[in-house]
Image (tube, rainbow, N blue to C red):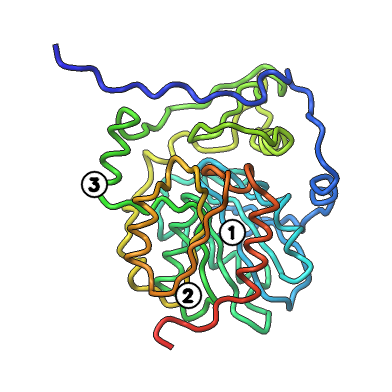
Amino acid sequence: MPASPPVTPPAPAPLAALDGHRPPAPDWFERAIAIEPERERIEVAGAGIETLAWGERGRPGLLLVHGNGAHADWWSFIAPLLADHYRVAAFSLSGMGGSDWRQRYSIDLYQQEAMAVAQHTGLFEGTRAPVFVGHSFGSFPVVTCAHREGDRLGGAIVLDAPFYTREQRERRDRERGGPVKSSSGTRVYTSLEAAIRQFRFLPAQPVDNLFIADFIARRSLRAVDGGWTWRFDPMLWARYEGARTIQELQTLGCPIASLFGERSSLVRSEVVATQRELLPAGAPFIGLPDAAHHLMVDQPLALVAALRALLAAWPAARPGA
């Protein structure tokens, strides 16, 4: 008999043992989330897009783009720690968070959303061109912006960005039993507590900061008839058009930097090595110790410190300058 493909075990549910109760949180986190952002919706290519912004207009602009299945509030405990010196904005990609769902999705639309949000929230009003930051899948629209409109940006920063060669992607698919398939629907839970007990991070990883997981989980849900369900389009990837390519890394119009988790299961050493070969000479590469894929969950303060230091000293020059 032919061997069965490996089966990826279900991701652990880090909040299950709390039974819906909020875990204690440190003072820095409570102070950060107490700073309410400016919350708005703008229309981009026919879809309403959820936007958040912190800090004064006129400061250098910083756009934060979340990853697959996430939403703008993944940055709500990070952005306030940067807003003393920057005008910071985040948004939910269409099909995720509080943004509208579409009949089709593409990297072109996500690029349009990023540029429109940056314009609307005043990131181009500062004395310096804005820097775009993307985590995981969010690094793809950020790099597309840097490739197509990099002359308008001061820089791009990718956080644990899964830019794979074809061979690396095929090997990862084999390891997890094939490509991730779209679902035809999301489960409805009878109570908020029941839904929170089932919240999981993908890829699976240990979670020490349960207060962050709980905050993200509560803002990942919406009330519907009969209970609660997740705030993302389960058909997104069935409706997504366009490939995720690494070739754009070689033709950027602005400087780029890469931060990654040193124990990430997505961005392993060979992926980092590939990026080093493709990115311009001298592009910063910063590994966060004891961080897996979700850097802002594992090491939020270390991520803030790394971003602060990087933005203070970089980018010194555009490619080729």
- Measure the C-alpha gap from mark 3 to mark 2: 27 Å
- Measure the C-alpha gap from mark 3 to mark 1: 38 Å
* Residue at the top extreme, as displayed: 1
Q: Residue at x 30, y 31 (%)?
A: 178
Residue 77 drawn above or below residue 83: above
Is label 3 or label 1 in front? 3
Q: Does label 3 or label 2 sit earlier along the sequence? A: 3
Camera-nearest residue between 162 and 117: 162
Q: Residue at x 67, y 79 (%)?
A: 125
Image check: 246 left or right of 132? left
Q: Does label 3 or label 1 sit earlier along the sequence? A: 1
* Residue at the left extreme, as displayed: 1
| Residue that carries the numbered disc 2 in the rendered image | 255
Classify mark 1: helix, strand or loop.
strand
| Residue that carries the numbered disc 1 in the rendered image | 43
| Residue kind at label 2, given as amino acid type | Pro
Image check: 106 left or right of 84? left
* Residue at the bottom extreme, as displayed: 321
Q: Which mark is residue 167?
A: 3
Classify mark 2: helix, strand or loop.
loop
